[in-house]
Image (tube, helix red, strand yellow):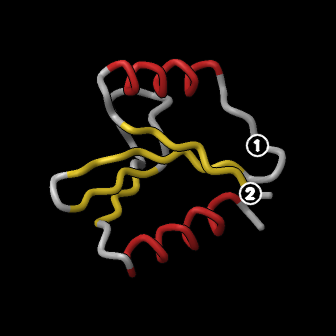
Amino acid sequence: MTESKFEQSWSEKAKKKGWYSVKIIQASKNGMPDRMYLKNGMIFFVEFKAKKGKLSKLQEYRISELRRMNFHVLIIAEK
């Protein structure tokens, strides 16, 4: 399965559970996670990876930066 299809399937599940899904296509900061999910005043970010996908150094940096600001960031990888 491609990374985009994997991401889309997870987003559809989240929407069914009431989460508002935002695809982060172009951000002022490169390396941001793929999606942002919002519900009831909560927000979290998700970086999706295909089977053999690996985080870039910039993605690792952005994720640690978001976590230092107390945001929840998940990395979901296809098995």
Which of these two is toward me, 10 or 5? 10
Q: Quadrant of residue 28?
A: top left
The residue located at (77%, 67%) in the rendering is 1
Q: Amino acid at mark 1?
A: Gly
The single residue placed furthest to the right in the displayed view is 52
Residue marked by disc 2: 78
| Residue 15, placed above or below residue 75 | below
The answer to whether 27 appears left or right of 34 in the picture is left
- What SS does tag 1 mark? loop
Q: Quadrant of residue 22?
A: bottom left
Q: Amino acid at mark 2?
A: Glu
Mark 2 or mark 1: whose residue is earlier in sequence:
1
Residue marked by disc 1: 53
The residue located at (33%, 34%) in the rendering is 71
The residue located at (81%, 52%) in the rendering is 51
Circles 2 and 1: CB distance less than 8 Å? yes
The single residue placed furthest to the left in the displayed view is 41
- Count of labels in the image: 2
Please identify, in this view, whether the residue under mark 2 or under mark 1 is nearer the observer.
2
Q: Residue 41 shows which numbered tag?
A: none
